[in-house]
Amino acid sequence: MKNINLEKKIKLSNYTTIKVGGFAEYFSMPNNINDFINLIKWSNINNQECRIIGAGSNLLINDIFLKGLTICTKKMRSITIEPISGLVEVEAGLMLPIMSNMLAKNGLRGGEWAVGIPGTVGGAICMNAGSGKLSIANNLLSVQVIDTKTLAISEIEKKDIDFQYRCSPFQQNNLLIISAKLLFQPKGNIEQLLETTRKNLKRKTESQPYDLPSFGSVFKNPTHNYAGKLIEELGLKGFKIGGAEISTMHGNFIVNNSSANSQDILNLITVIQQKVLQKKGIFLQPEVRMMGFDYP
């Protein structure tokens, strides 16, 4: 099969923002959509399990040998912006902060919130990533996907996707996101948009631990509450297990102090859940995806 570039026994900690993860049996970073589709076909034909990582944020990979193919989409970053209509077509691997800045430079409103989220467009759609009450689903028109079982490529309109808070069907089904069409508000003031985007990033960097490896937010916010607030009220900031620590800056962040392994982090997530449930009566749902664990 053409355009199949596979590496073997690649350490996945180099591809996650928390800097933890085992080895991939096969690994590839496709340069474009055709390469991506060919890799999916290869894994199907060879009966290989296939898993996708984008920016590797919001992702905890077990420190084990992961059989099958791991695809990193970060080189799939083509984007087309129509400033007059506000229509944006983008491949799954483009980083959200890059898209956010490009939208502002083209006078498109509605993507300013995304500047501080260290994920890809595909990962954001899969997780329905957002900030506050805003999420990427608000601007989505349609998603191009490939079915890992049938290899059929199709386009799904937003109305046919059951998006929920930090959740989408793509977390459970056999469909992998290739690209997306989004719509933003045109004819915005470029200088104001750039300033708002800059301020959003500044606010994020001042309140969150960007100087250490982390996931981003660990837990979804419960209804009418905030995960970070609940964790901080229990005095858990700075609590450690091995090399994993609850950030002293923000209670909903776990940081890796250079020596954390996957079990340290999973144990810390579990302890947080137990303590918040015991003291507050609230079970915190992880926003972080688990890969290679027997974890729901």
Image (spheres, rainbow, N blue to C red):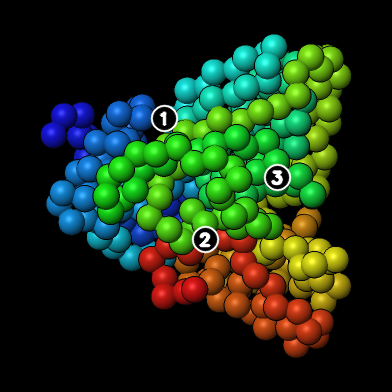
Is label 2 in a helix, a strand or a loop? Answer: strand
Is label 3 in a helix, a strand or a loop? Answer: strand
Closer to viewer: mark 3 or mark 1: 3
Q: Residue 285: name its quadrant.
A: bottom right
Residue position for label 1 = 75
Q: Earlier in the sequence, mark 2 or mark 3?
A: 3
Q: Is residue 81 above or below residue 96?
A: above
**C-alpha span from label 2 to label 3:** 18 Å
Is label 1 in a helix, a strand or a loop? Answer: loop
In the visual, does 134 lie left or right of 21?
right
Q: Are marks 2 and 1 in contact (CB under 8 Å)?
A: no
Amino acid at the residue labelled 3: Ser
Closer to viewer: mark 2 or mark 3: 3
Residue position for label 2 = 289
Which residue is painted at 36% across and 43% down in the image?
146
Which residue is painted at 27% across and 57% down in the image?
49
Amino acid at the residue labelled 2: Arg
Q: Residue 67: name its quadrant.
A: bottom left
In the visual, does 254 lie left or right of 258?
right
Which residue is painted at 53% across and 45% down in the image?
123
